[in-house]
Image: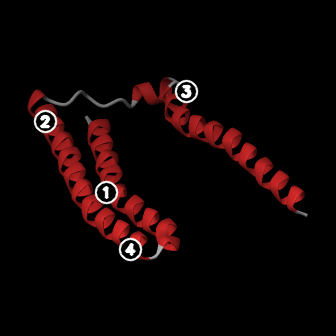
Amino acid sequence: MAGNSERGSSRALLIALVVAPLLIALVMLAPALAQAGGGAAAATARAPASPEVMKWGFMAAALVTGLSAIGAAYAVAVVGGAAMGAVAEKPETAGRALVFVGLAEGIAIYGLIIAIMILGYL
């Protein structure tokens, strides 16, 4: 029985390791393929932004990235310290503690997404 369980979990892991990179590559290539699609998109291209707008756009992207990274660092420091204290008292809570640290790290990812959206507008 244990052999079938291990074989099934290793097969699922192998499928995940093959499918996940392909799915990520597809998601990353989709915008490039859509832009290369044709002349209709080129006809509706907007005029380039003025240098003043570009300057403030770059500053906003840098500011949102920096502040979200600082916020995430503070959150990870607080949550990580509390999580390690909880794991020291009760070792079986390590998995839950890791999830909370990952949620705190998501703040930086959200800031990076907003910065990419700002830069995409320019």
Disc 2 residue type (three-letter) = Val
Mark 2 vs mark 1: in front: 1
Q: Secondary structure at mark 1?
A: helix
Question: In the rendered image, which residue does mark 3 sit on?
Answer: 37
Disc 1 residue type (three-letter) = Ile
Disc 3 residue type (three-letter) = Gly
Q: Residue furthest left?
A: 52
Mark 3: few, some, or many residues within 10 Å (few <14, many ≥20)?
Answer: few
Residue at the image point whose x is 43% and y is 67% from the top:
97
- Residue 3 vertical placement versus 30 (above, below): below
Residue 18 x, y percent position in the rendering: 70, 39
Calculate the distance from the C-alpha at mark 3 to the C-alpha at mark 2: 28 Å
In which quarter of the view is residue 72 placed?
bottom left
Comes first in the chain, label 3 or label 1: 3
Q: Residue furthest front?
A: 89
**Any mark on residue 88, and which?**
none
Question: In the rendered image, which residue does mark 2 sit on?
Answer: 53
Mark 4 vs mark 2: in front: 4
In which quarter of the view is residue 8 placed?
bottom right
Mark 4: few, some, or many residues within 10 Å (few <14, many ≥20)?
Answer: some
Front one among 114 and 86:
86
Question: In the rendered image, which residue does mark 4 sit on?
Answer: 86
Give the position of the C terminus as an image quadrant. top left
Disc 4 residue type (three-letter) = Ala
Residue 20 x, y percent position in the rendering: 63, 43
- Residue 64 vertical placement versus 96 (above, below): above
Comes first in the chain, label 4 or label 2: 2
Residue 10 x, y percent position in the rendering: 77, 49
